[in-house]
Amino acid sequence: MTHDALVNDAPEPLTAWCVHCGRRTSAPVEVGVMERGSSAPLIQYACPEDAVRYGAGPSPADEIR
Ligand SMILES: [Zn+2]
C-alpha cells in the first residue's frame, strides 16, 4: 500500500455549503429539503451560526415541557 492509497481512501469530511451565507461549513445542519419532483430531493444545509434562522436547534417549544 502506498502513501497515496492511504490518502485517497480517507473518507471525505462531511462538508456542505450554507444556504444562507454561502460559506462552506464542516458542521452542516440540515435545515430543509427541496422537493424536485422527478429527481431526488435536494437537502439544504446551513452553517451552525445560520441554522437557527431556519428553526434548527433549540426552540421555545423544546423548552416548555
Ligand atoms: Zn451560514
Image (cartoon, rainbow, N blue to C red):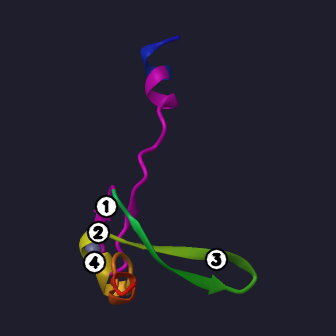
Q: In which image quadrant can residue 53 be found?
A: bottom left
Q: Is residue 18 magenta?
A: yes
| Residue 64 screen position, x and y as percent | 36, 87
How would you rate the neighbour count of disc 3 (Cα within 10 Å): few for under 14, some for 14-19, many for 20 or more? Answer: few
Place of residue 44 in the rendered image (x, y in percent of width and height, measured from the top left): 47, 75
For marks 2 and 1 on the same chain, the one whose residue lies earlier in the sequence: 1
Name the residue type under label 4.
Asp
Q: Position of residue 38 (x, y in %)?
A: 75, 82
Q: Which of labels 4 and 1 is toward the front?
A: 4
Classify the position of the C terminus by image quarter.
Answer: bottom left
**Is residue 34 one of those drawn in magenta?**
no
SS at mark 3?
A: strand
- Residue that badge 3 annotates: 41
Q: Which residue is painted at 64% across and 77% down in the image?
A: 41
For the residues carrying marks 4 and 3, which lies nearer the camera in this image? 4
Residue 50 badge: 4
Pinpoint residue 9: horizontal percent, then vertical percent: 52, 29
What residue is at 41 percent from the left and 46 percent from the top? Answer: 13
Write down the residue under mark 1.
25
Q: Callout 2: 10 Å neighbours few (<14), some, many (20+)?
A: some
At a point 27% along the width and 77% down the height, the residue shown is 50
Q: Nearer the viewer, residue 54 or 4?
A: 54
**Residue to which mark 2 is pinned:** 48
Q: Is mark 2 within 8 Å of ligand 1?
A: no
Q: Can you say whether 65 is above or below 12 in the image? A: below
How crowded pointer 1 is (Cα within 10 Å; few <14, some 14-19, many 20+) is rated as some
Tell me which amino acid carries mark 2: Pro
Q: Is mark 4 within 8 Å of ligand 1?
A: yes
Ligand 1 contact, mark 1 (Cβ < 8 Å): yes
The residue range painted magenta reads 6-26
Residue at 65%, 84% (x, y): give it: 36
Query: Marks 2 and 4: in contact by CB < 8 Å?
Result: yes
